[in-house]
Amino acid sequence: MNPDVIRDLIQQGLPGARVEVLGEDGVHFEAVVVSEAFAGKLPLARHRMVYATLGERMGGEIHALALRTLTPDEAARG
């Protein structure tokens, strides 16, 4: 698995999301996902939305994924 594939999967599952994924060892990754779909949702719900885009790859091909999930407004505030 590589960061580009993960980014593409998340973007397919969350249309319009801005996604940045880092990970050099092929199993541990970090992602920043900015999506309007996160508005009004708690962090756990946001993470579940991202995990749903990756399906069975989580815990398999993707051993660990550290997430930072933001709305566009939150991202603009830094």
Image (spheres, rainbow, N blue to C red):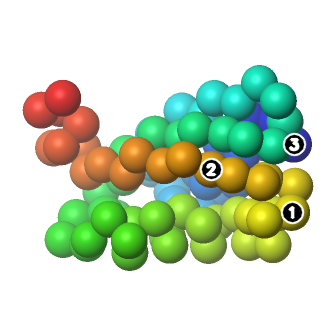
Disc nearer the start of the sequence (3/2): 3
Tag 1: amino acid: Gly
The residues tagged by marks 3 and 2 sit, at their Cα atoms, a distance apart of 12 Å
Q: Nearer the viewer, mark 3 or mark 2?
A: 2
Of residues 59 and 1, the one drawn nearer to the viewer in this rendering: 59
Residue under the point 54% across and 62% down: 50
Q: Circle 2 is placed at which residue position?
A: 65
Tag 2: amino acid: Leu
In this image, 66 relative to 59: left or right?
Answer: left
Q: Circle 1 is placed at which residue position?
A: 60
Tag 3: amino acid: Met
Q: In this view, does 28 lie above or below 57?
A: above
Q: Is residue 8 visible?
A: no
The image quarter containing residue 39 is bottom left
Q: Nearer the viewer, mark 3 or mark 1?
A: 1
- Give the x, y percent position of residue 9: 70, 53
Q: Circle 3 is placed at which residue position?
A: 1
Residue under the point 86% across and 63% down: 60
Of residues 14 and 51, the one drawn nearer to the viewer in this rendering: 51
Task: Give the farthest residue toward the left.
Answer: 77
